[in-house]
Image (cartoon, rainbow, N blue to C red):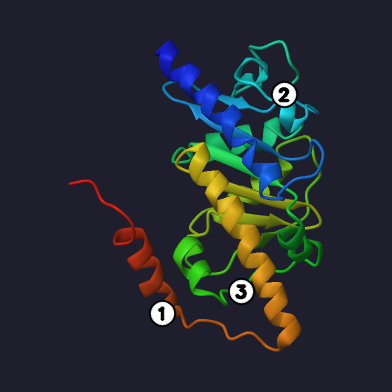
């Protein structure tokens, strides 16, 4: 792989980590971001237990997707096996984020999907945000839950029962956006439930909204 591309990925992953505490998605050292290294079966991921203020390109960890050998001096995140499993099973994924953002994690604590109450959810997630089952931390079990929940699903976010949130994207920035949006709609949906019974959007309307957002919204090259 071109060393310039590897260096750019390390820089981007380091920079993106600052968004997690800024957006209120993490507490202390919990949570992490990774990015797939183009052209090789490796990823760049946050080091274990390091403060977000102290994350730099130089102290990130480059880890093999098979076998999890680390090519840097720091110990990688305790979620490394989960990230590696997702990358192996979902080759279209280029970035992964894990958070314990409070509103989304509240839904996870009761093991509930977030229904599609909002046009913003239809846009970004293409329907409800699924809640996967419980899995222990440290191995591939969480990765298996994430992949099973998201395979064939339009949502780039999944809740893990009793745990938190994982999001995926074509690159790390897209995964961070999904994590921010997941927390935003989780908060609004929970507030709506305090007022009454939220109205779910009909499937045809969800499809139309998601199609407009993914195909027409924003700037297009050419």
Q: Are marks 1 and 3 in contact (CB under 8 Å)?
A: no
Residue placed under numbered mark 2 in the picture: 76
How many residues crowd around disc 1 within 10 Å: few (fewer than 14), some, or many (20 or more)?
A: few
Q: Can residue 42 be seen?
A: no
> Which SS class for mark 2?
loop
How many residues crowd around disc 2 within 10 Å: few (fewer than 14), some, or many (20 or more)?
A: many
Relative horizontal placement of residue 14, taking residue 132 as reference (left or right)? left
Asked which quadrant contains residue 82, the reply is top right
Q: Residue at x 76, y 58 (%)?
A: 105
Among numbered discs 2 and 3, the one appearing first in the sequence = 2
Q: Residue at x 78, y 48 (%)?
A: 135
Residue placed under numbered mark 1 in the picture: 205
User: How many numbered circles are shown?
Assistant: 3
Q: Position of residue 183 (x, y in %)?
A: 65, 59
Among numbered discs 1 and 3, the one appearing first in the sequence = 3
Q: CA distance from mark 1 to mark 3?
A: 14 Å
How many residues crowd around disc 3 within 10 Å: few (fewer than 14), some, or many (20 or more)?
A: some
In this view, the residue farthest toward the left is 222
Q: Position of residue 221 (x, y in %)?
A: 23, 46
Residue placed under numbered mark 3 in the picture: 115
Relative horizontal placement of residue 181, taking residue 219 as reference (left or right)? right
Asked which quadrant contains residue 71, the reply is top right
Q: From what the image shows, is residue 214 above or below residue 116?
A: above
Q: From what the image shows, is residue 61 above or below residue 78?
A: above
Q: Are marks 2 and 1 in contact (CB under 8 Å)?
A: no
């Amino acid at each position: 792989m071109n060393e310039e591309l590897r260096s750019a990925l390390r820089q981007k992953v380091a920079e993106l980590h600052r968004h997690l505490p800024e957006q209120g998605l993490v507490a202390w050292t919990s949570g992490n971001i990774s990015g797939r290294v183009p052209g090789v079966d490796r990823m760049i991921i946050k080091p274990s237990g390091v403060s977000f203020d102290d994350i730099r390109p130089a102290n990130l960890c480059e880890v093999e997707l098979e076998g999890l050998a680390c090519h840097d001096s720091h110990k990688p995140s305790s979620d490394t096996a989960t990230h590696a499993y997702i990358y192996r099973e979902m080759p279209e994924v280029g970035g992964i984020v894990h958070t314990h953002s409070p509103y989304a994690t509240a839904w996870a604590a009761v093991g509930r999907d977030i229904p599609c109450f909002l046009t913003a959810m239809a846009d970004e997630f293409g329907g409800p945000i699924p809640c996967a089952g419980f899995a222990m931390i440290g191995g591939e079990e969480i990765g298996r839950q994430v992949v099973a929940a998201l395979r064939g699903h339009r949502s780039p976010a999944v809740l893990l029962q009793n745990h938190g949130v994982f999001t995926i994207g074509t690159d790390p920035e897209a995964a961070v956006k999904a994590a921010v949006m997941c927390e935003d709609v989780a908060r609004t949906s929970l507030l709506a439930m305090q007022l009454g019974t939220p109205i779910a959007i009909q499937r045809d309307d969800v499809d139309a909204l998601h199609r407009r957002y993914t195909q027409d919204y924003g700037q297009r090259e050419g």
